[in-house]
Amino acid sequence: MLAWVVPPLLVAALVLQVVLADRARLAGDPEWRPRIIALCNTIGCSVPPWHQPRAFHVTARDLRPHPSAAGALLVTATFRNDAAYPQAWPLLQLSLANLDGDALGLRRFAPREYLGSEPGSQWIGPGQSASVTLEVLDPGKRAVSFEFDFR
C-alpha cells in the first residue's frame, strides 16, 4: 500500500517545488497571481510586487514657465494605477520633443523625486492616483511637446 502513496506524494512535492522556484514569473501572470498569493499565504513565502508599467495612465498634465526660476519649466501631472493589483511606485520618464518629434531632453524621476519625499507606502493601489510636480530646465523654444512614460 505504501508503494501507491509515496510516488504521488513525491510528484506533488516536485510540482510544489517547481511552482515555488518559478513563483516570480508565475506571479507576473494575471491568471496565476491569485493562486501564487494564496499558496504563499499558506506556506509563508513572499510574492514579488506586481509590475505592469503600461497600467499607469496620465489623467491630467500641464507644462508652463516656472513662476520663480528663470530658464526653468514647471511640469504637473496626475497619473493613475489601472492595474488590478497594487504596484511599486514607477520610475516616471519625462521627454520633451521638437516639432518633428525628435527628443530634446529626457529624464527619469524616482518616486522620491516626483512625490517630493519618500512615499508613505511602497505601493500605489489599484485605481489610486498621484499628483506630481517637476521642475526641469527649459530646452528653449524648439520644445513643443512633452510626454510621460512609466518604467
Image (cartoon, helix red, strand yellow):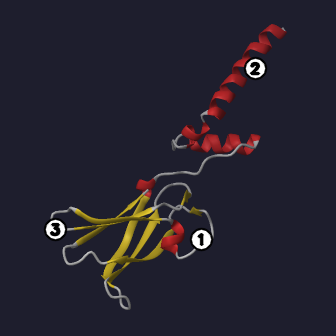
Vertical comparison of 84 with 70: above or below: above
Which amino acid type is marked by label 2?
A: Leu
> Residue farthest to the left?
100
Closer to the N terminus: mark 1 or mark 2?
A: 2
* Gap between marks 3 and 1 measured at Cα: 36 Å
Q: How crowded is mark 1: few (under 14 residues within 10 Å), some or many (20 or more)?
A: few
Q: Name the residue under label 1.
A: 118
Report x, y in % for residue 127: 50, 64
- Residue linked to disc 2: 9
Work out how far the residue at label 3 is from the one at label 2, CA to CA, in angstroms.
Answer: 65 Å
Residue 99 tag number: 3
Q: Which of 88 and 72 is in front in this view?
A: 72
Provide residue 145's location: percent of width, then percent of height. Answer: 24, 70
Label placed on residue 63: none
Q: Which residue is drawn at 43% across and 68% down?
A: 79
Q: Is mark 2 on a helix, strand or loop?
A: helix
Q: Is mark 1 on a helix, strand or loop?
A: loop
- Say whether residue 84 is left or right of residue 76: right
Inspect the image, locate mark 3, and give the three-letter code of the amino acid beneath it. Leu
Q: Do the residues labelled 3 and 2 touch (CB within 8 Å)?
A: no
Q: In which quarter of the image is the C terminus?
A: bottom left
The amino acid type found where label 1 is placed reads Glu
Determine crowd level at label 2: few under 14, some 14-19, many 20+ residues with C-alpha closer than 10 A. Answer: few
The answer to whether residue 135 is left or right of residue 26 is: left
Image position of 80 (left or right of 103): right
